[in-house]
Image (cartoon, rainbow, N blue to C red):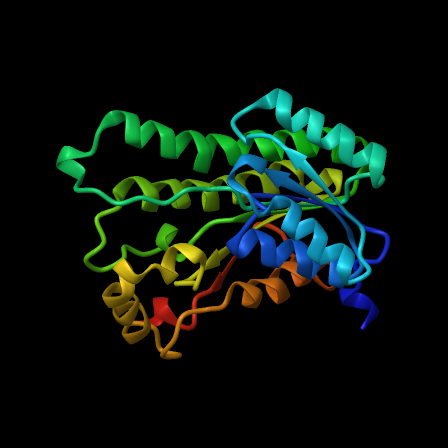
Amino acid sequence: MDLFSLKGDVALVTGAGSGIGKAIAIGLADAGASVACFGHTSKGGLQETVDAIVTRSGKAIAVEGSVTSEADLADAIERTERDLGPLTVAINNAGIGGAGAAETLPRETWETLYDINVTGVFLSCQAEARVMLPRGQGSIINIASMSGSIVNRDLFQAHYNSSKAAVIHMSKSLAMEWADRGIRVNAISPGYTLTPMNKRPEVAEQVKMFKRDTPLGRMAEPEEMVGPTVFLASRAASFVTGVDLLVDGGFVVW
């Protein structure tokens, strides 16, 4: 359906080198968008995402940088618009996880996670809005987590949970602030997802618990975040802003 087509759109995806970000970048390209894949090339995967898009007859570029750097973000958007065209869609996916008992969690660990998960998302939104606002058009989608709405049983991650709650509320706040200037801002909150981090042998028992606690009885594949993202990015969601879309296999109903 044309409502879901992203033909003619130009998208920027942060954290596009692996997991959910990689799947979304490829999915946006499949829907017709040209995609700038932003992230750390030193960690690998970024060029592989671009190659996967090009192999599928899409258009993409790799842009190296950090979401904690205003200069990197500005350069990424400048290059995106120079090489691909005016930015119309932004997916702010870059983030890190972590666990640790609250009473012994080092301040440095807290600050590092917040710098990427919260400040990095805000700086990304800010940089993207600076080019979208003058044109009166754009869709920004921030990848949060169901952990921003609930507390995961037996997982000690007060820093991570609260950072994702901040992303959700930030998205709603920006949606209100920019609504009358043509930018829609929404969040997607994935449930437990089979990213590379959750495929490690050392978390096999934990993964069993994740599946048990999810009503659908399994974890999501990263590709299952593509449909919700395309929806929120497209004209099909033209009257949708300030929403936190839970994609969690029903987890929060229990």
Vertical position of residue 76 compared to residue 145: above or below = above
Vertical position of residue 243 compared to residue 132: above or below = below
Q: Quadrant of residue 207?
A: bottom left
- From this viewpoint, which residue is outermost toward the top? 71
Residue 97 horizontal/vertical position (percent): 36, 45
Residue 206 horizontal/vertical position (percent): 25, 64
Quick one: quadrant of the N terminus? bottom right
Vertical position of residue 49 compared to residue 95: above or below = below
Q: In screen coordinates, is 5 left or right of 160?
A: right
Q: State the residue at coordinates (43%, 63%).
A: 193
Nearest the eye: 207 or 4: 207
Residue 95 horizontal/vertical position (percent): 46, 42
For the image, the number of numbered tags is 0
Q: Quadrant of residue 239?
A: bottom right
Quick one: quadrant of the C terminus? bottom left
Q: State the residue at coordinates (56%, 63%).
A: 225
Q: State the residue at coordinates (40%, 79%).
A: 216
Q: State the residue at coordinates (54%, 51%).
A: 18
Q: In screen coordinates, is 10 left or right of 147?
A: right
